[in-house]
Amino acid sequence: MLFDLQVFLLNLSFVFLLFFIYHKYVEGKINKASNEIVIGVISAISIILCMTFPLSISPGFYFDFRQVPFIIGMLYGGRKVGVSLLIVLLTYRFIMDFGPGFQSSVIIYVLIFIGLCYLFPRFQQATKFKHKLTIAIVANSLSVILLLVVVYFFNVNLTLNAWISLTLFYCLQVIVMFLFILFIERAKAESYMLSELKELEKLKVVSEIAASISHEVRNPLTVTKGFLQLLQDKTITDDKKDFYIRLSLNELERAEVIISDYLTFAKPSLDNVELLELNEELEYVLKIVTPYATMRNITITLSKTKQMFVAGERQKLHQCLINLVKNGIEAMPDKGQITMSLHESNEQAIIAIQDTGIGMSEDQMKRLGTPYYSTKTTGTGLGTMVAYSIIKAMRGEIEVDSKQGVGTCFTIKLPKVNCENKH
């Protein structure tokens, strides 16, 4: 009895393990033709393993769970898969033992195959889980009844206990079929729900960015519209006209910057890639941001090193570095210091931008670089997203280390290019 239980559990594990691997790692990742092949291979392996470890209650007659992978394989794989499984099953049965048991197997599984050919289109067309489950259980129940009838007509000498064991075994097989169809359909439903959630997440990100862009662009356009309406007043002086025009142009320029940042984030590819010497590029960035820093009583220092080259687009690298330095400046409300440094490590060029600002919490650091997130009350969050996108397009990465009340350090790692490759 203990041995029979072990064989039962072994058969069960063969079928479950292989189909679990399929639904966990394969389904939905390959095309239809490849999917049918994989289902056929998995079902065939399950059939062979089940038949290799059978229960024998009478000489020449072996009983196992081969019907479960045979039925599942054909219902989910189709008629071609069913033909392949029928050939595998009967061939392996012939190799194991040619005799009355083989003849009964031919009759049983050919009839089961014919029945499944009839049920397969109905199973595929079924949209509700209950309908699929009913068809599978009916197929398995009819196959069990057919097997018992064939065994009976072959006048197999079975004791009463043997008939009880056989009936009990195949009743358990029906239950196992129920559980497997339940598992497969639940796995498919969960996989479908996960894919839908991913699509919804993408749409949510797009809608958030679209809403933020719309909001940010609308503000300068509304201001510009108001000033243009004021310009229609013929009584205003020339000085006020110049003032309104200057403010309108500033607002339009701000809208242009926002749209440019969004386009850079949406398409972070590099168009004009060239060799860039980082010391020179950092010097340029320093000249650009120094006036803005001076206005806020911020000092910026640059620590240079030997010549170091990377491949990238000059304008976009400038945009990235300026955004990060500007963020550091704005993180220090009452004077402070920003340190820019350059060094190399493991064939990588390392740019560090350290500020003495208010710093960030762990949660803020995790969300940094995600769509429309900014630690500033007046920020759009696009500048940091753009910086991350540009560095990613340059095959680099950005790391952030921050402590509240102490400051933040952005570390940019870029693949270094050897000097001899410059020409």
Image (spheres, rainbow, N blue to C red):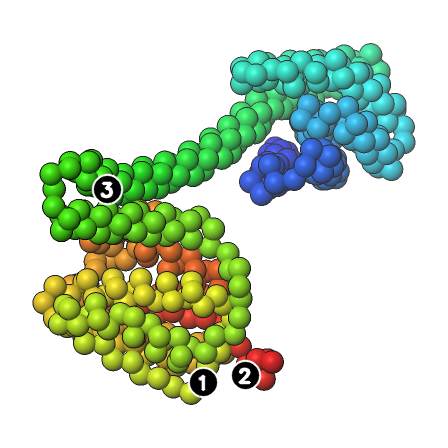
- Dividing the picture into quadrants, the one containing residue 114 is top right
Residue type, mark 3 in image: Thr
Expressed as whole percent of the image width and height from the top left, the position of residue 89 reads 80, 31
Residue type, mark 1 in image: Gln
Expressed as whole percent of the image width and height from the top left, the position of residue 213 reads 32, 42
- Write the residue at 31% across / 83% down: 303
- Dividing the picture into quadrants, the one containing residue 73 is top right
Give the side of residue 353 with respect to residue 139, left or right. Answer: left
Q: Nearer the viewer, residue 197 or 235?
A: 235
Q: Secondary structure at mark 1?
A: loop
Q: How packed is label 2: few (under 14 Cα within 10 Å), some, or many (20 or more)?
A: few
- Decide if residue 10 is in sight here: no
Q: Nearer the viewer, mark 2 or mark 3?
A: 3
Q: Residue furthest bottom?
A: 306
**Residue occupied by mark 2:** 419
Q: Nearer the viewer, residue 64 or 370?
A: 370
Residue type, mark 2 in image: Cys
**Residue occupied by mark 1:** 307
Expressed as whole percent of the image width and height from the top left, the position of residue 226 reads 19, 37
